[in-house]
Every structure is written in structure tokens, then in C-alpha cells.
Image: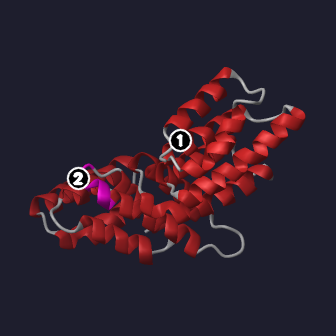
Amino acid sequence: MSGAIVDYSLISACITAILDLGDSSSYPVLFNLLCAGFPEVIAFEAAGAMDLIPGNYAQFLADVIRINPPEEKLAAFKAGNSSNHLSIYERGYLAELALEQSFSLMDGEENTVLSAMRYAAISALVPLRWTRASVLAIRHYYLVYADYQQGDAAKEQLVEAIACLGAVGDSDAALVLALQLGLINISTEKTGIYDNAITLAIIKALGMIGHKDVYEHLLQVSYLSYPDSIHSAAREAIEHLKW
């Protein structure tokens, strides 16, 4: 009810009682509290209780990400990503699913919540090195690159998209990055104009993937007027190629 006074101490006590009962059937109740717009401390307690209650927590979150509205999808992904008890496999699966869902529901003008979930999923996938998400990461990269060209995405977001390709990418991701490096090399040779952060990110990502077919693009870097930091990164990337 509008204007009603909420007793947050009572809600907190209820969360503690639910946690003591330890029944996974309470996941939906706790998740509703997480999404109800209560103060952050209540949401934190609700998420912490779900994380501690024995049960298939990852499956519950996956079902929410797959079925529920965008705001709840994002809340479920964030809960899983901040979990201290889910395995690396479970967190990787949830991040992949969140990224997949952020694309599957895009129609016309992108939903801002789904966009936030897409970027959050990419951030989660980088340290996990979840290679199963390579195709999705490539799609994300193309979207961010187009947005960056139009001034709708920050450079840091593009650099993170490149880092994600390096962390989860396969030969297809290597080809995408190698073609971009080739274009940068051509521009540098003709005009001397390049972006240091983006170029360095691409070279490092290619080294992480280690696909040998990018050798010529990396070698070309050494012949151009890049700074020592980029020359050094290219040499290191070449050393990581798998022959």
C-alpha cells in the first residue's frame, strides 16, 4: 500500500527465519524481496540467504534469467554472479545464459536493462574464460564497435569487449580481431593515426587466443611506427601463438 510504513527489522527477521528453515522452496519468496525495491541491506540479506540455503540455486536463477521480465533477469544474474557458493561452471553458465537472453529479446530499440545485463555478463565472462560463449562474445563485440563508431559506447566498453574475445575466443574470434588489427596497421602506415588503448587490447587478446594464423598481422606491427609498449606486446603475443 502506498504510504504504508514498512518494518524493515521484521522483514530482516523473516529472512533469518527462512534461512534457518533451509528449504529451497523459499527461493521465490526471497527473490521477490530482492526485486521489491527495499533498501540495499534487505536485498543483500535476501540474496545471501538464497546463496546459503541448500538446493539447486543455479537452476533457480537460470530459470528466472530464461523466463522472467528483463529487470528480474538482471537481478537473478547479479545474484548468481556475486554468489560465494556457486561453482565456476555454474557462474559461467549463468553469464552465458544472461548474454544469450540479452540478445534474444532485442527488438528494435534495445532495452536498457537488457543492455546492462549484456555488459555485466561480458564483465563476468572475462575472468571466467568461458569459451562456450565465443559466438555470443563476437556478436557483442560487433555491437559495441558499431556503437563506439557512432559515439554511443565508451572506449572502455570496447576495450572490455576485445578483452572478452581474448578470454573466451576461438579461431573465429581471432579472425575478427586480426582483421581489425590489419585495418589499424594500414591506417597507421598511411596516416600514423591509431588508438593506443584499442590497438594494445587487440594485440593482447590475440596473444591470449594464440591462433597461429594471426602471425602476419602481429609481425607487421613491428615494422610500423608504434610505441615500444605496442611493439613489446606484439612480440609477446607472437610468443604465445600455438603452431
Label 2 element class: loop
The quadrant in which the N terminus is found is bottom left
Establish if 243 lies above or below 18. above
Q: Which mark is residue 85?
A: 2
Across the whole image, how many numbered discs are drawn on residues? 2
The residue to which callout 1 is attached is: 207
Dot 1 falls on a residue whose secondary structure is helix
Question: Foreground residue, 53 or 216?
Answer: 216
Q: Is residue 86 left or right of residue 32?
A: left
Q: Amino acid at mark 1?
A: Gly
> Residue 56: where, in percent of width, then height?
22, 68
Residue 75 lies within the magenta run: no
- Name the spot of residue 58 as percent of width and height, x first: 29, 65
- Magenta-tinted stretch: 84-90
N-terminal label among 1 and 2: 2
Query: Could you tell me how far apart the alpha carbons at marks 1 and 2 are, in whole angstroms?
Result: 32 Å
Estimate the x, y position of residue 218 in percent, counting from the top left. 65, 39
Front-lying residue, 24 or 6 = 24
Residue 70 visible at all: no
Pointer 1 with pointer 2, Cβ within 8 A = no
Horizontal and vertical percent position of residue 226? 74, 27
Closest to the camera, between mark 1 and mark 2, is 1
- As drawn, is 215 to the left or to the right of 19? right
Viewer-proximal residue, 79 or 207? 207
At a point 19% along the width and 54% down the height, the residue shown is 13
- At 72% from the left and 37% from the top, the residue drawn is 220
Dot 1 crowding, Cα within 10 Å, few <14, some 14–19, many 20+: many
